[in-house]
Image (cartoon, grey):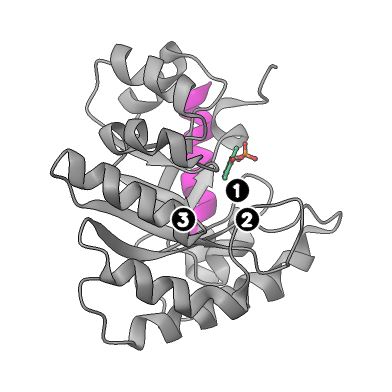
Amino acid sequence: MIEERLQEVRSNIEASKAKRDASFDHDVLLVAVTKNHDIYAMREAIDAGVTDIGENRIQEAKEKFETLDRQVTWHLIGHLQTNKAKQAVKMFDLIHSVDTLHLAEAIDKAAAGIGKVQKVLVQVNLAQEESKSGIYEDELMDLLHKVDEMENLQLMGLMCIAPNYEDVEECRPLFAKMRKIFDKVKEISWQTANIKYLSMGMTHDYTIAVEEGANVVRVGTGIFGPRQY
Ligand SMILES: *Cc1c(COP(=O)(O)O)cnc(C)c1O
């Protein structure tokens, strides 16, 4: 089942890539979101070709991290509390959810403590939804510059979560705007940042996100089916 769904997601991504602007030349990295799915599902997905997995809670990720007997790239996609930064840097290759200076400082310090340069994305709250994490656009550049200056962080790009619109097409202008911001950010001459990743799109909206220029998508339900809580 997982293998078939994975194939379907991959072919949807290819179809969306074919529709998009030729200037978007990146491959699209599929992050399989395994939150609330067990280690068996994870193994099955990895054996079917998944190379990158996403988790959004530290405790759940830790249990899996200690049990999983497969080599994968770990992505933290959920909100991170500063008091869990130490645990996060031990596990995750890329943290998608940096959205305050305070959190960036905590991750920088935690990474320094284990002699690591932690790769991060800054999460943008483009629709300015109060209930969601992410920095607002008007404060974005300032945060990016500060992250770029931190010795134990390497800024790799931007992440966003679109609002849960009833009509998913409403995400499109938002994703297009994110792509514009991403292109602008890429042009800046950074000290250590390597702006590569634009992480946007989940099960219900990843095809639109890819069409609008996403090069990282985070898909859970589309691969593993509905989560049982
Ligand atoms: C859960 C989650 C996803 C995946 O959601 P699906 O709708 O199951 O694809 C993607 N991104 C973030 C930040 C998430 O928390």
Disc 3 and disc 2 in contact, CB within 8 angstroms: no
Horizontal and vertical percent position of residue 136: 63, 70
Q: Main secondary structure of the magenta part?
A: helix
Q: Earlier in the sequence, mark 2 or mark 1?
A: 2
Q: Does 188 appear above or below 72?
A: below
Instruction: Answer with the quarter of the image where residue 185 lies.
Output: bottom left
Q: In the structure shown, which secondary structural element does the residue marked by tag 1 occupy?
A: loop
Q: CA distance from mark 3 to mark 2?
A: 21 Å
Instruction: Answer with the quarter of the image where residue 69 lies.
Output: top left
Residue drawn at the location 34% of the way across and 62% of the way down: 27
Q: Residues within 10 Å of mark 3 (few under 14, many from 20)?
A: few
Q: Is 122 on the left-hand or right-hand side of 109?
A: right
Asked if ligand 1 lies within 8 A of label 1, the reply is yes
Residue drawn at the location 41% of the way across and 21% of the way down: 42
Q: Nearer the viewer, residue 168 or 54?
A: 54
Q: Earlier in the sequence, mark 3 or mark 2?
A: 3
Q: Which residues are magenta?
A: 1-14
Q: Quadrant of the C terminus?
A: top right
Residue type at numbered disc 2: Ile
Q: Which residue is mark 2?
A: 161
Q: CA distance from mark 2 to mark 1?
A: 8 Å
Q: Nearer the viewer, residue 54 or 11?
A: 54
